[in-house]
Image (cartoon, rainbow, N blue to C red):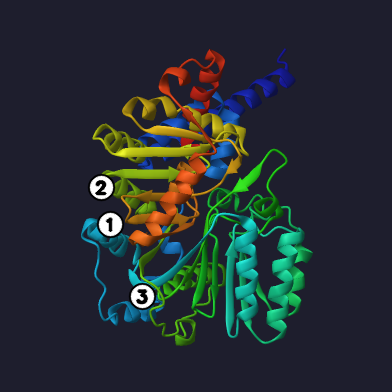
Amino acid sequence: MIDWNLLASQIATIAFDIVYFGAIIGTIVVIILDNRNPVKTMAWILILMFLPIVGLIFYFFFGRSHRRERMIGKKSYSHLLKKPMAEYLAQSACTLPLSYGRLISLFRQTNQAFPFDGNRVVTYTSGISMLQSLLRELQKAKQHIHIEFYIFEDDAIGRMVRDVLMEKAREGVEVRVIYDDVGCWHVPNRFFEEMRKVGIEVRSFLKVRFPLFTSKVNFRNHRKIVVIDGRIGFIGGMNLAERYMRGLSWGIWRDTHLMLEGKVVHGLQTAFLLDWYFVDRTLITAARYFPKIESCGTSLAQIVTSEPVGPWKEIMQGLVMAISGAKKYFYIQTPYFLPTEAVLIAMQTAALSGVDVRLMLPLRADNRLTHLGSCSYLADILRSGVKVYFYKKGFLHSKLMVADDELSTVGSTNIDFRSFEHNFEVNAFIYDMETALQMREIFLQDQRECMPMYLKNWVKRPWYRKAAESVVRLLAPLL
């Protein structure tokens, strides 16, 4: 006699196995056919093979890719660039530095990043000084304020900035705010609703609604941009949260931010308005957002953006070229060090050729997993002659790079796969001696608060620590 319950159970088991393994094999085929970076492809395949259920969930959330065509059409993009391009072409004399002409050209070709001269650059290395300057400039706003942060916390700092924005909106100033939906996931909606009630236009970037838009979790807007009346801009690594000002229980929060004044603010304005089009589908191109600006300093600068949906990895490609082109030195500060192969080879090659390459990382990070992954790369670069320093005074969140007393860059970009391939990022690239020397001095001052690491000591760390680092390194392209 046939046991129908047993037969049904066996059929259900076979059907489940077919669907289960079919989903895994199908996902692997999709990943291979997507022609991604082989390192990233292998990382996904390893996860799907050894942790299939976890791998499927993670791929559904974090693995799928988007395309640039979904952001903005070519005609709209050209229209948005019309005013800054006119200002760029109208420059009476913009002498490009010979040693960085190709780098500037790269950013022009891949990113439409116009180099503007006659800018003033003010550097902040503490959250308090940056916040004081930001609040002072916001109070001066007469026409519009555009503000975009990955994190806009509902704490004393976030509420302080929010209240100033609300005050300016009541005075008739146009205020637009973009915040990242994942970066502000735990911020109550009432925080933003209070701004909307007084007329502030507030938009979240790539709002996540499970389970429909889960792939958007992986593509975050990590940019920090403020534009005031089209004349003053802020860019850097600081978000609007108390920890950026007060530090952590175990040390200070060391970060770098810039205030820009001059025509280069047109680049920041363009970046913001492109993001605004993305979140609001409204193309803002009025001339009043790009006022005529006279020279107010001596710095030549470009605002360079990168995004996960474009054909190029603009900031990563620029850093590879900058590192490879360094003649004397190249100093890097970054909270996370999970470099792509191209960046890693560029650093090693520069060091082996006699360039003084230095990397500064936090001794203690805010994310243990990424810190383990970062440590797995250090033996490779130490062997090539790269000097490594661990910042002891607190958490180093600064994304500062400086080279040869001529080039410096500050922005939101970390030296890791996430910044290079998954996030929407923005950096200011500045070409002048005065700024570079200032950045170099900042690096050297921080170096005094560091513990240097030597290869002979580094290789003696416990085997289980090396094993943990190696395992995390396999996941580096996905972190």
Question: What amino acid type should be assigned to the residue bearing mark 3?
Answer: Ser
Of callouts 3 and 1, which one flags the residue occurring earlier in the amino acid sequence? 3
In-image side of 190 versus 176 (left or right)? right
Residue 167 locus on image (x, y percent): 73, 79
Q: Looking at the picture, does residue 433 appear above or below residue 91? A: above
Mark 2 touches mark 1? (CB < 8 Å): yes
Residue tagged by mark 3?
Answer: 78
3D distance between C-alphas at marks 3 and 1: 22 Å
Q: Which residue is mark 1?
A: 103
Instruction: Tell me the distance, in whole angstroms, between the alpha carbons under discs 2 and 1.
Output: 9 Å
Asked which secondary structure carries label 3, the reply is helix
Q: Quadrant of residue 90?
A: bottom left
Residue 462 can be seen in this image: yes
Eye-nearest disc, 2 or 1: 2
- The local secondary structure at tag 1 comes to helix
Quadrant placement of the N terminus: top right
Mark 2 Cα-neighbour bin, 10 Å: few <14, some 14–19, many ≥20: many
Tell me the residue that label 2 is attached to.
325
Percent x, y of residue 294? 39, 82
Q: Amino acid at mark 2?
A: Gly
What residue is rendered at 44% in x and 86% in y? 287
Viewer-proximal residue among 447 and 471: 447
**Displayed quadrant of residue 38:** top left
214 to 77, vertically: above or below: above
3D distance between C-alphas at marks 3 and 2: 31 Å
Circle nearer the N terminus (2, 1): 1
